[in-house]
Every structure is written in structure tokens, then in C-alpha cells.
Image: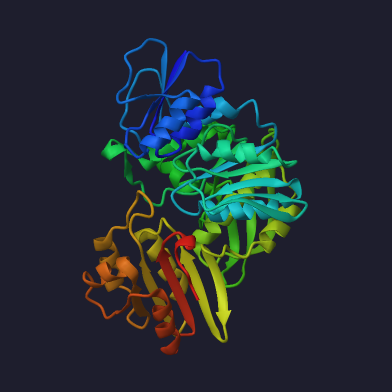
Amino acid sequence: MKVLVVDMTHGGIKIALEFLKKDLDKVYAYDIYKTLKKEDINVLTKKGLIFVDKIPDEEDLLVVAPVHSTVEEKNQITHHEAVKLLLSTRIKVPVIEVTGVKGKTSVVWMLKEIFKEQNPLVLSSLGIEALIDDKTHLLVNNISITPANIIKACKLAENFEIGIFILETSLGGTGLADVGILTNLAEDYSIASGTKTASMAKSQIFNSKMVACDYDAFKSKYSRFSQKTITFGYKDDLTKVDVGASNVNFGLDNTHFKAVINNLKTINGRLLNTEFDVSTFAPAEHHLNNVLSAVCASLILEVPIKTIQRGLKNYRGIKGRTSIKKIGKITIIEEINPGINVKAVEKSFEMISPYKDCAVILGGRYGITCEEINEEMAADFLDNTPKNIKLILTDDLGRSIKSKINRNAEYHRNIDDALESAMASGSKTILLIYRSNFADINMR
């Protein structure tokens, strides 16, 4: 058999090199975006890859292309499926994969706290780390969540006694997971030059043995996978979801609620009906939904309730994503995310609206992810936000939105100047919504 790996930009090199280790006739590499330097191609050619500028017209050729690719061949699998093909016999421990539009990294870090006693290997957009005997070993800092990096994580895991893999994966799952998690479909954006949607790509998560799926996403897109799906969601009607929440008391530092479990089927076929208290960091509804996804996946894997409670109590947000800090009597809520979009901005405003003396700082950069923010929709939303909430815009994104809105708003080029202005205005609660990778900014 011969294999052609398409796209050397989004993890194709790792996949192609892994195929070279197999007993194959040829392994072709197609650098479709022309991002490799000539010296890189020379090095990879010496290792055995055959570079081509088009798809070879050969029999017995398996084409491996990213799910967002426009390439369409008869005998074709995605990068996700290739990773399963390459690793399925090498991973001997349980696997959780997390995908979705929003909340992936947060959910992975909640799961890390819940499964900390099992020595987890964690892959997220913040890096690859092993938590061994309650000690964190950072193996790689800031990494893409393209499925090919699971190969890298697997290799790094060989140096540790790992008990479970917890993997954040973009645009669906590989099929390696005992439990896949679909956090949400907050926005069903286009991929593959408009020929596919995010929901189509993320349906790959249902190649997992079982799936914990956001209720709204399940009902709108994935009800055909009902046999392997357990739903979660924050709903008034608790009979709609398998994992829900009641008696919710939101707080900036701690949110308390009762987890309500209805006929949840575990990985071993047991049915679970119960209720238990949870206290964790979840200042708004979308954060609570993330928590419910972690609860759902943990229960599917038959984690004891006390272990779930303890793990979530220890979760305090993520520095560089969603977290809270205090400066004197001022509370600063940080929502820093490369995937900030209009829906996320709306949810963040809902979170802060009950509090007095508030300010919101909004800004960020372009080109962080494939999905850019819709500035016209953002401007329209901001024009209709309460005028008693001070609005400060910053950086490239803030400057562009400033030119599109009608309501009063300050602009500061530098994020630190924006924070100083918010604190000087007398605001007691400051919400920072910033579109960026945390590693790209130096804050305070």
C-alpha cells in the first residue's frame, strides 16, 4: 500500500514520518500550502518521504488529508483517523478527547484535577504535561491541538507511568477515546473554503466509544448518535438532559450547585441516578456548562462522586484563559482566549451585568485562529449594552471595533494602559475579554 499525506502545515509531517515506520511501499508528502523551506524538504526527503505537487494517479493509494481540506478522493481518511490508525495499538490506558467550539482547554484542566491520582498525560493548547504523583512535568509549552500532536504526546508519555490520556483536539476526535466530549457548538462556522462546517468536522468525536455531548448541539446536529451519547446542559427542564444542575448559586470566586444525574449509562453499562453538591470556579452559565461536561465524562468512566467533587473544588480557572485575580478591593476577571467570538462576548457581559461599578476591556489580535470575530455583530451588540458599564477597547481588534460602534468607549493601544484606566475610573469589577494566545502578551 502507498500513503499520501496532504498538508505539511497542520501536522502532516508528524503523520507522514509515522507512516514511514510502517511496512508500506511509498509515503508521499503533499505540501499543499507551500510552507516548507527547501532545506526542510531536503531533510525529510533523506528520511524517506517522497514530495509531490499533486495527487499521484496510482492504485492502492490511501490519501490522508485534514478534515478542513478541500481534497476529495475515493480512498481517503482524515488526519484524525490516521492518528487512530497509527496509535491504536500503542495506547494501553483510558483516553478522553475534548473538542468543541468553546471551553475545550478549561474542561481539560478540570479533568486534570479530577483524574490527578491516575497520573494523567494532558495535551491542551497550553502545552503537554504529565501530572505524576501530584507533581507537574511540563513537557512542551504552547502547542497546536491539531490531531497530529497526539503522536508527539504519546512519544513523550513513554518516559512516565501514565494512567490516562486527556487530550484537547481541534475539529473532532480521532476515535482513540473511551469518552469523547463535545463541549458546545457556540458557532457553526465554515471550513474547507465554505464546503464544510465545524459541526460536520466535529462529528468525528462520535467515533469515540461513548460521548458526553452538549444537549443543544446533540438535538440540533447529532441526534443520530443517540446510542452512544450522554447529554449535559444547564436547563430549566432537568428531564431533558442526562447531567444537569439545580439550585445554582453563581459567584465570581465560587459557584455552588447540585448536579442532577438522570439514567446516565456508564462505560460498563451501569445506569446512574443520583444528585450531589458541587462547588467550583464557574462564574457564568457557559462556565457551568463546561463543568457539567467534565462531570458527565467522569461519571461515564465511573469515577467516584467524592473524587469528582474534590477535583472540581480544586479547579480555580486557568491563568491565561478564564481566571480571577484581586488587586486590593478590585476584582479582575480575565477571559483570554484565541477563539473569542461574539457569542463569548455576549456571555461575558451577562456574567458581569449583576455587579455595580463595572468596566469591560475588549480587544485582541487577528490571525490567532482560523475563525475570526464578526466585528459588525460585535459592534451591534456593544451598542446595546448597559451604558453604566464602562467600555474600554484595546489593541488591533479594539481599534477596529471602535470605528464601528456608536456608544461611548475609550481606546488604549496598550492593554496595560487600558487596565490602569479601568482601575482609575473607580470600577470595582473589571472584565478583560482579550482575543489572543496568553503566551503572546505580557500582562502586568
Q: Position of residue 359 (x, y in %)?
A: 41, 80
Q: Is residue 294 left or right of residue 54?
A: right
Q: Is residue 177 left or right of residue 115?
A: left
Q: Residue furthest top?
A: 59
- 41, 320: nearer the viewer: 41
Residue drawn at (34%, 34%) of the image: 69
Q: Position of residue 35 (x, y in %)?
A: 35, 40
Q: How many marks?
A: 0
Is any atom of residue 443 visible in this view?
yes
Residue drawn at (43%, 67%) of the image: 348
Q: Is residue 368 left or right of residue 112?
A: left
Whether 3 is drawn above or below 302: the answer is above
Q: What colour scheme was applied to this rendering of the protein?
A: rainbow
Whether 444 is drawn above or below 158: the answer is below
Residue 413 placement: quadrant = bottom left
Q: Residue furthest right?
A: 133
Is any atom of residue 224 visible in this view?
no
Whether 421 is drawn above or below 24: the answer is below
Q: Position of residue 153 (x, y in %)?
A: 60, 41
Residue drawn at (58%, 65%) of the image: 248
- 437, 166: nearer the viewer: 437
Q: Position of residue 27 (x, y in %)?
A: 45, 21
- 135, 49: nearer the viewer: 49
